[in-house]
Amino acid sequence: MKQCYFCQHEVEQIDFKETEILQKFTDKTHKIKRKKRTGLCAGHQRKVAKAIKRARQLALLPYQENVEV
């Protein structure tokens, strides 16, 4: 089982302006990765999802890309 990234690094707050960290929790089509994939605890997964959504609204991160199959 993976250790939560934010618990391990003792991060107090998840800031939506830190896009380099938030990009670790999105896949190549910019979808938010599931908790099983990221290894985050439930509380931090919710905070990461909220921070990614806020960053998208301010155009710091892109929305999902449509991938043609």
Image (spheres, grey):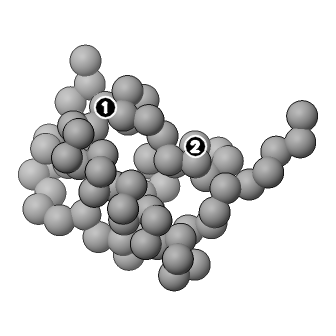
Work out which quarter of the rendered image holds the C terminus and state it: top right
Report if residue 21 is visible in the image: no
> Residue furthest toward the bottom?
58
Q: Secondary structure at mark 1?
A: loop
Q: Amino acid at mark 1?
A: Gly
Q: Residue furthest top?
A: 1
Residue shown at the point (39%, 55%) measured from the top left: 49
42 or 30, nearer to the observer: 42
Report the residue marked by disc 2.
Answer: 27
Q: Which residue is denoted by mark 1 in the rendering? A: 39
Residue drawn at (42%, 29%), measured in percent from left and top?
Answer: 37
Who's the residue at 67% across and 56% down the image?
Answer: 64
Q: Amino acid at mark 2?
A: Asp
In this view of the protein, can residue 38 be seen by the observer? yes
Q: SS class of the residue under badge 2?
A: loop
Judge from the rendering whether residue 15 lies leftward or rightward of residue 36; answer left or right. left
* Quarter containing the N terminus: top left
